[in-house]
Image (cartoon, grey):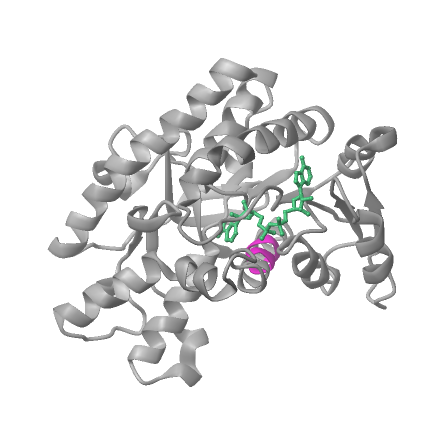
Amino acid sequence: MVKAVVIGAAGGIGQPLSLLLKQSTLISELALYDVVNAPGVAADISHINTPSTVQGYLPADGGLEKALKGADIVVVPAGVPRKPGMTRDDLFNINASIVRDTAIGIATHAPKAFVLIISNPVNSTVPIVAEVFKKKGVYDPKRLFGVTTLDVVRASTFVSEANGASEKSLEYSIPIVGGHSGETIVPLISASQPSVSFDQSKIEALVKRIQFGGDEVVKAKDGAGSATLSMAFAGARFAISVLEAAAGKARTEYSYVDVKALGAGEWSSVVGDLTFFSVPVKLGKDGVESVGAGIKANEYEQGLLKVAVDQLNGNISKGVAFVADTA
Ligand code: NAI
């Protein structure tokens, strides 16, 4: 019996994500929480004849507590998305408090759940959740994940396409490490599986496209938001992997996790003193089992990693300071 909760379930990501989770037979109970329209989304999705039960919750009458009680996994796409010209960091002022309050709810009502953070800026919101959990005495770094899967999904699409093999995109795996915004997203195309060979200018163009792929969507939506459908796909893929691993199947995914607490392994020399960094993680019954190894960055990519580490330092401190000042 698995209870999955979506916080922000009525939003652009939340609705298709809830739909995709309803398709999974691993989930027996789906709780959809939002500050608006969650009962409507839940009523709609509940008519789908997969086995899980679906219930929608609003803040009134202890809705957050009811949604979270007994949760095994909580996925959080609550918050505002970008408009053209905005960086993910521009969202901090609004989303930081939404994520902090959500984290307080999870720490209180579902302290053992796997927690998957989608709300941006992920580089700062995940440290916010960690700090809240530490204050509440319930922090388990094996169970807290920043969702960077969309960068991995985009990279498979863009690199396979550039290699003239779009029809094989599902077979393309490109390590993406670092964080989840602009230059903190570091694609290691030299370690792509299957291996690919492009000239340096093409590689640099691909790296840019993967780093700023989200901007293509923001621009095309022209004020109506950022990636929602591809994000729902990526978020559902990650959530299902976490649940499959908890059910005993070995799974590896990339995620922005507390490498300091978990042990960064081969990534130690890259991450230095950073707490959070996206790395390959081997998932098991209790979440992260270990940080994956065996991926090498070439010289050009090492330069990209340095830039990412510098920026991440500031992003992480900003999240930590926010909780110290306000929670
Ligand atoms: P949206 O505005 O369509 O939906 C957000 C939902 O959150 C709304 O339904 C809103 O009512 C709800 N919400 C606001 N405050 C809440 C609270 N305190 N508790 C519960 N729900 C609350 O936005 P969209 O497009 O779904 O994006 C959501 C977040 O995901 C944004 O921060 C966006 O930047 C981020 N995102 C992350 C990506 C990633 O790769 N990690 C990719 C794309 C977007």
Which residues are drawn in magenta?
Answer: 235-240
Q: Who's the residue at 48% across and 39% down the image?
A: 91
Query: How many numbered callouts?
Result: 0
> Where residue 243 sits in the image (x, y, percent)?
63, 52
| Vertical arrangement, residue 262 with respect to residue 208, above or below | above
Q: Is residue 302 left or right of residue 152?
A: left
| Left or right: where 57 falls relative to 315 | right
- Please state which of residues 93 and 43 is positioned toward the viewer in this rendering: 93
User: Residue sitting at 65 percent across and 37 percent down?
Assistant: 113
Up-down relation of residue 8 to residue 28 (above or below): above
- Of 95 and 147, which appears nearest the observer? 95
Q: Nearer the viewer, residue 22 or 78?
A: 78
Residue 55 position in % (x across, y down)? 85, 48
| Residue at the spot 41% in from the left edge and 64% down from the top edge | 216
Chief secondary structure of the magenta span?
Answer: helix
Nearest the camera: 70 or 99? 99
- The answer to which quarter of the image holds residue 60 is top right
Quarter of the figure that contains the C terminus: top right
Residue 314 is one of the magenta-drawn residues: no
